[in-house]
Image: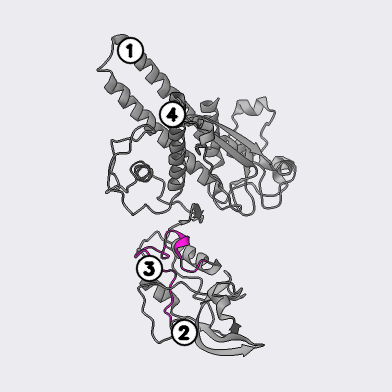
C-alpha cells in the first residue's frame, strides 16, 4: 500500500500490511490494519524493472532511502479502500508476474510500481492509464522511476507529461525525428534507427500496405506533434473528398456540415521552469521538418513528370518549383527564428527559472492542402510590464537589456549616448542586484542569435 505521511517530502511512503483484524463499529464492518515500512521496495522494483546501466543517468539513490521505520494502525472501510477513495491509503499496483505468499495477497504482497503490462518498461507502463490503480502516489512513483532512468516523457491518454531534466538530453536529433515521422507515415516502427522510406503519403495517396506493428515508439513530444499533424491531414483529406462529392451531387451534406476536424491544437502548460518554452520550440522544429519533407517529395514528383510535357511546361514547372522552395524555406525559417526575438524581449531570469517567459503566446501555424507549411502568426498577451520598472531581488529585467549592453558596438554606444556605461549604471537593471544567468547561457551569444533572427524575419 501507499501511506500518506507528512515526513515524506513527496507525501507518500510505501507500506506493507503486517496484520489486519476485522471489526464492527456502529453496525458498519471495518478493517483494522497494522502498517509497517517496506524496506524491500527499492530492491524489489529494481528486479521488476529493467534498468539500463547508463553513466549519464540520474543518481538512483531514491527518495525512500532516508525513510525511518514506522508502524501505524489505521481503521478503514474495505469497500472505500477498493475504490481508492481513502484519503491516506492507496493500493499499490501489483505486477502479474509476481507471486504472492500466503492466502492474503494484500498482507504478503511483494512491492511493485505497476501492473508491468510491458516487460522491461521502466515504471511498468509508457501510458499511466494502463496502471491498475490510478491515483496520486501511483502516478508520482511511476514518474519518479522513469525520471531516475532518464525517461522524461510519459503518456496519460492523449496527454504527454514531460518532467524537466535540467540537463541536455540525446532525444532531439534528426534521426529521432525521422523515426517518429516514419511511424506517423507508415503506422509502423522502423526496423532500424536509420531506416527511411521512399513512400511519402499525401492526403490523396493511399497508405502503402504494410503490416501494422502493435509497438509504438516511446512517448515523446515528437509523437504528440505528429499525431496532431496526421489528424489535420486526415481532416483536410475528408473535407476535400466531401467537397468533390457535393460538387458531383452525390451528397446532401456540404463540406462544412460534414464537420471534418481539420484544425488541431496543442496546449503546452506547466509551472515556471517546467520547460514550456523549450517544448514549444521542439514542436515547431518538428513541424518545420515535416514541411521540408513534403517540399522535397514535391520536387521529386515534379522532376519525374518532366519526362512528359513540352519544354514550355518544363520551364513553368521549374519556375514554380523554385518559387515554392524559396517561399517554404523562408516561411519555416521565419517561424523558427521568431523564438530568439520573443525570448529576448519577453523572457527574464526569475527565482525559479533563468529563461522564464513573462508573457502568454499563441502560435497559429498554417499548412496547405499538400501538408507544407504556408504561414504562421504569433500573438502575445499578458506581458509582465511591472518587471520593467521593478524586478524582484534575485531576478533580472528582460534579457534584451543585458544582451545589448554586453554586445553594443562603439557606434551603437555613440548613437544611443551610452558611453562606457554598464548594467550596474542603470537603476532599472541594478535594483535587483542580479546581473548574470545561472544556466551558463551567454548573453552575447543570445544577442547575436537575436540579430540573425531579425535579419531572417524582417
Of badges 2 and 3, nearer the viewer stands 2
* Front in this rendered view, residue 293 or 100: 100
Task: Tell which circle, 2 or 1, labels the residue nearer the N-terminal end.
Answer: 2
Q: Residue at x 55, y 84 (%)?
A: 70
Q: Is residue 319 above or below residue 293?
A: above
Task: Tell which circle, 4 or 2, labels the residue nearer the N-terminal end.
Answer: 2
Of badges 4 and 3, nearer the viewer stands 4
Q: Residue at x 29, y 44 (%)?
A: 194
Asked if residue 125 lies in the magenta stretch, the reply is yes
Of badges 3 and 1, nearer the viewer stands 1
* Secondary structure of the residue carrying numbered label 4: loop
Disc 4 vs disc 1: Cβ atoms closer than 8 Å? no
Q: Residue 372, can we see it?
A: no
Disc 2 vs disc 1: Cβ atoms closer than 8 Å? no
* Front in this rendered view, residue 212 or 174: 212
Disc 2 vs disc 3: Cβ atoms closer than 8 Å? no
* Front in this rendered view, residue 232 or 446: 232
Q: Residue at x 61, y 40 (%)?
A: 361
Task: Tell which circle, 3 or 1, labels the residue nearer the N-terminal end.
Answer: 3
The residue identified by callout 3 is 49
**3D distance between C-alphas at marks 4 and 2:** 66 Å
What colour scheme has been applied to the protein in the rendered image?
Answer: one colour
The residue identified by callout 2 is 107
The region drawn magenta spans: 109-134
Q: Residues within 10 Å of mark 3 (few under 14, many from 20)?
A: many
Q: Is residue 232 above or below residue 48?
A: above
Could you tell whether 395 is left or right of 128 in the image? right
The residue identified by callout 1 is 313
Amino acid at each position: 500500500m501507499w501511506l500518506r505521511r507528512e515526513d515524506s517530502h513527496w507525501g507518500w511512503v510505501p507500506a506493507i500490511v503486517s496484520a489486519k483484524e476485522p471489526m464492527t463499529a456502529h453496525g458498519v464492518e471495518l478493517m483494522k490494519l497494522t502498517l509497517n515500512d517496506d524496506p524491500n521496495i527499492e530492491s524489489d522494483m529494481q528486479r521488476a524493472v529493467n534498468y539500463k546501466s547508463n553513466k549519464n543517468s540520474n543518481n538512483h539513490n531514491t527518495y525512500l532511502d532516508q525513510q525511518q521505520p514506522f508502524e501505524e494502525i489505521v481503521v478503514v472501510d474495505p469497500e472505500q479502500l477498493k475504490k481508492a477513495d481513502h484519503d491516506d491509503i492507496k493500493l499499490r499496483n501489483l505486477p502479474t508476474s509476481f507471486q504472492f505468499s500466503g492466502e492474503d495477497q494484500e498482507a504478503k504482497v511483494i512491492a511493485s510500481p505497476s501492473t508491468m503490462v510491458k516487460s522491461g518498461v521502466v515504471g511498468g507502463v509508457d501510458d499511466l492509464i494502463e496502471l491498475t490503480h490510478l491515483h496520486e502516489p501511483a502516478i508520482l512513483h511511476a514518474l519518479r522511476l522513469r525520471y531516475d532512468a532518464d525517461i522524461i516523457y510519459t503518456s496519460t491518454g492523449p496527454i504527454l507529461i514531460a518532467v524537466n531534466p535540467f540537463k541536455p538530453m540525446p532525444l532531439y536529433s534528426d534521426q529521432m525525428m525521422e523515426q517518429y515521422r516514419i511511424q506517423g507515415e507508415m503506422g509502423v516502427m522502423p526496423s532500424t534507427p536509420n531506416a527511411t522510406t521512399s513512400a511519402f503519403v499525401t492526403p490523396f495517396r493511399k497508405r502503402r500496405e504494410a503490416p501494422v506493428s502493435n509497438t509504438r515508439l516511446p512517448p515523446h513530444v515528437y509523437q504528440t506533434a505528429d499525431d496532431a499533424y496526421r489528424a489535420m491531414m486526415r481532416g483536410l483529406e475528408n473535407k476535400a473528398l466531401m467537397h468533390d462529392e457535393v460538387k458531383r451531387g452525390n451528397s446532401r451534406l456540404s463540406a462544412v456540415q460534414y464537420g471534418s476536424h481539420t484544425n488541431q491544437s496543442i496546449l503546452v502548460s506547466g509551472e515556471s521552469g517546467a520547460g514550456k518554452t523549450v517544448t514549444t520550440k521542439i514542436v515547431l522544429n518538428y513541424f518545420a521538418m515535416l514541411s521540408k519533407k513534403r517540399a522535397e517529395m514535391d520536387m521529386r514528383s515534379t522532376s519525374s513528370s518532366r519526362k512528359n510535357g513540352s519544354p514550355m511546361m518544363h520551364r513553368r514547372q521549374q519556375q514554380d518549383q523554385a518559387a515554392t522552395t524559396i517561399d517554404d524555406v523562408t516561411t519555416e525559417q521565419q517561424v523558427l527564428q521568431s523564438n530568439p526575438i520573443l525570448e529576448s524581449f519577453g523572457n527574464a531570469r526569475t527565482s525559479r527559472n533563468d529563461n522564464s517567459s513573462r508573457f502568454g503566446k499563441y502560435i497559429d501555424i498554417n499548412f496547405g492542402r499538400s501538408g507544407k507549411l504556408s504561414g504562421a502568426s504569433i500573438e502575445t498577451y499578458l506581458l509582465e510590464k511591472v518587471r520593467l520598472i521593478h524586478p524582484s531581488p534575485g531576478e533580472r529585467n528582460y534579457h534584451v537589456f543585458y544582451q545589448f549592453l554586453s554586445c553594443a558596438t562603439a557606434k551603437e554606444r555613440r548613437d544611443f549616448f551610452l558611453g562606457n556605461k554598464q548594467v550596474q549604471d542603470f537603476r532599472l537593471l541594478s535594483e535587483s542586484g542580479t546581473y548574470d544567468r545561472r544556466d551558463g547561457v551567454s548573453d552575447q551569444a543570445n544577442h547575436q542569435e537575436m540579430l540573425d533572427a531579425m535579419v531572417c524575419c524582417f
